[in-house]
Amino acid sequence: MANLGTTVIHEGVFYQLFFEVGLLKSGQTLGGFIIVAVDFTASNGDPRSPDSLHYSVPRGVPNAYQQAIKEIGEVIQFYDSDRRFPAWGFGGRTPDHNISHCFNLNGSAVDFEVEGVDGIMAAYSSALQNVSLAGPTLFGPVINKAADIAGHSLSCHHAKYHVLLIITDGVVSDLQETINAVVKASDLPLSIIIVGVMPISRKWSLDADNGHRLESSTGRIATRDIVQFVPMREVHGRKISVVEALLEELPSQFLTHVRCRDIKPLNV
């Protein structure tokens, strides 16, 4: 349990985001919307090899991705209003023999949502049996698809803030395209949490913590910082807790969006 200001956080309940701006008192509903994207690129190693990050360990011991899905998911699910998650994979060769940089994790052609953390885990396990690891590692397509969802929500005046979790081994191939996608999404109700199951390369090129906002290839400057990194090795090494890792930047990113959109509580 952590005490942040006047708000008590227990097991990752993110209600402090809303208390800080008085939205719960205003009659305005601002439910969360969590989106998960899992890295199926070959840099993770052959899933049949014990050295692979996708290796299905005997006796039910979770692999690196299952650990990340479970540990992060069980915290952040409290922020999702209905606990139905869009769940995608990227960088894999799907059953139609095409390499896809954003495919439905559950294998459905029409429905990308799954029920709860258990639904993500089941969809991931099923995908491992049906999707071959390929590449390259492209973040741009999943960010753009998440931005489409956030943009549609905004255009329909739905008061939802979206969080895209990208779970990856950290080998990024499309750095400039990713920067372009992040900049484009920076004025939408969206944050991106990149969960590294291995040390993440080039992370400082995406994170604006140094005070310099990202710039696209066309010269557009990001409206705000929307990217955060969660290194699972530090979580497992007990340097930080999952809650601390997730709450490091997400509240401030949310509040910056609220201020940029001039969202005002009615009763504070």
Image (tube, rainbow, N blue to C red):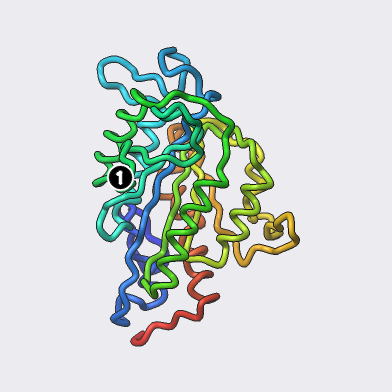
Q: In which quadrant will I find the C terminus?
A: bottom left
Q: Of residues 7 and 44, which is closer to you in this image?
A: 44
| Residue found 48% across the figure and 37% down from its top | 90
Q: Is residue 261 above or below residue 161?
A: below
Local crowd at mark 1 within 10 Å, few (<14), some, or many (≥20)? some
**Location of residue 105 by image quarter:** top left
The three-letter code of the residue at mark 1 reads: Glu
Q: Secondary structure at mark 1?
A: helix
Q: Is residue 121 above or below residue 162?
A: above
* Residue in the image at 35% along x and 30% along y: 127
In this rendering, the answer to whether 221 lies above or below 37 is below
**Residue 233 visible in the picture:** no
Q: Pick whichever, 175 or 225, lies toward us.
A: 175
Relative side of 241 to 182, left or right: left
Q: Which residue is mark 1?
A: 74
In the image, what residue occupies the spot 57% across and 47% down? 140
What is the x, y in percent for residue 73?
34, 44
Camera-side residue of 181 and 117: 181
